[in-house]
Amino acid sequence: MKKFWSFTETFSRSALEEFQSQRLCALVRFLARRNSYYRERFRKEELEATSFRGLADLHRLPFSEKKHLQEILETTRPSLPNRDLLRWHQTSGTSGTPTRFPDSRRDWVAYSDLAASALYAMGVRREDTALAAFSYGPHIAFWSYLSGLDRIGTTVVAAGGLTSEARVRLLLDYKVSVLLGTPNYTMHLAAVARAMDVDLETECQVRLIVTSAEPHPTELKQKLRDCWGAAVYDRIGSTETGGIAFECPANPNVYHLQENYLIAEILDQNHRPVAPGEDGELIITTLFRQAMPLIRFRTGSIVRRAPGESCLCGRSFLSLQATQTGVVVRRIDDLRKVRGILISPTEIERIVQEESQLGEHYQVILHTRDHSDEVTLRVESLPNTSPAQLQKMKRGLGKKFQERLLLRFNVEIVEYGSLPRRADKAQKIIDQREIPPIHQ
């Protein structure tokens, strides 16, 4: 049985960088020909695609951010007719209207290969039976997992839209060996199984759990191992960039950046590379994506560079070191991830301000109930607001958050002046989530 999914995972550091340089040169030439947005940005930077030198000139390429994505999309679509597009996905709209992402057929082959490479590295094989306990929504990650499993040839048990109890029965009936889900939901499934008098150690054959889409502190990871009696490995990514890094089974708490599909930079505030053990912002350039290419995309995630470039597993990829709170140390933009969806104070405030009978102050409380993330919004009503108006606003706010952020908010409208005021910057989002306990 082969050890690596792709031969590019076996490259030495010098061979890997040469491979990246060749792919980057090809991408820059493609964008200069086919994408007016990047062509104009290259012109402003006085960058000639024909003389671009790959990694040696990476620093000359302009950064891109979330605010640029819609403009990039508008200039990219004309170069890719609909017959060349295979899929559309979208973000949760944390900064306004959700950003929609197209992928061509060629893009999706590479995207599926990216997921297969990570899953294979974490131990998924053709002989396995997998259950993906995700919500099959518009976000790209869950669909790429299914495509990655297809590439490996793994048998997949369809479980979308089912209750947790039904999913537990599927785990048993189909002798599922690989479970994919968010950290909190896989813990919730364990609690549901116990409530159903299912002994996970003797009746369940899950040997591997692959998690993603939520912060994964080391303590929770250990609880999941103890609870399921299975190996637990994590993967990070985003709708914008796709998969980014996976946890190495040979070196737990170290995440290998998938540099055979992307270029990763970890930069300080002055845009200089950080040393091993230091924290910096993760910057991603996608090497195989043409329908929605990203050049030096600022993820907003502060991560810690792991020491060394070689690993016991044989890969020479740049790697991230997980901390006690997870592989992402913090976010620059105060975004918080809830059930795999990023929410921002900016978009919440925009929705609240649309209601004329509400005050300007609000608080968002993130907490855990029955092993699942919950969001409670507390807002103030203006004086003399009638009970009927309060009920109408409560229903309206709940509907708007569901439609725009794809999350259910528990809306609480309190009296004007009851929320705390501070002279300095107010804390808009209060994260009270705890590691879910194991119910014996």
Image (cartoon, rainbow, N blue to C red):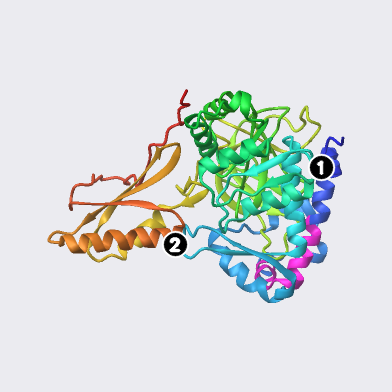
Q: Is residue 399 left or right of residue 279?
A: left
Q: Nearer the viewer, residue 284 or 362?
A: 362
Coordinates of residue 434 in the picture (x, y in percent) = 43, 32
Q: Is residue 353 left or right of residue 218?
A: left
SS type, badge 1: loop
Query: Measuring 58% from the left and 54% from the top, which residue is drawn there?
Result: 136
Q: Which residue is mark 1?
A: 5
Number of other residues with Cα within 10 Å of mark 1, as a class: few under 14, some 14 to 19, many 20 or more: some
Coordinates of residue 412 in the picture (x, y in percent) = 27, 51
* Separation of residues labelled 1 and 2 (CA atoms): 38 Å
Q: Is residue 368 left or right of residue 214?
A: left
Residue type highlighted by circle 1: Trp
What range of the chain is rendered magenta? 24-42
Query: Measuring 64% from the left and 49% from the top, which residue is drawn there?
Result: 158
Coordinates of residue 416 in the picture (x, y in percent) = 18, 53
Label disc, if present, on residue 353 of the rendered structure: none
Residue 26 forms part of the magenta stretch: yes
Q: Nearer the viewer, residue 207 or 221?
A: 207
Q: Quadrant of residue 218?
A: top right
Q: Is residue 53 left or right of residue 73?
A: right
Q: Quadrant of residue 232?
A: top right
Question: Which residue is most to the left?
Answer: 384
Residue type highlighted by circle 2: Arg
Label disc, if present, on residue 404 of the rendered structure: 2
Counting the numbered discs, the total is 2
SS type, badge 2: helix
**Visible in this render: residue 210?**
no
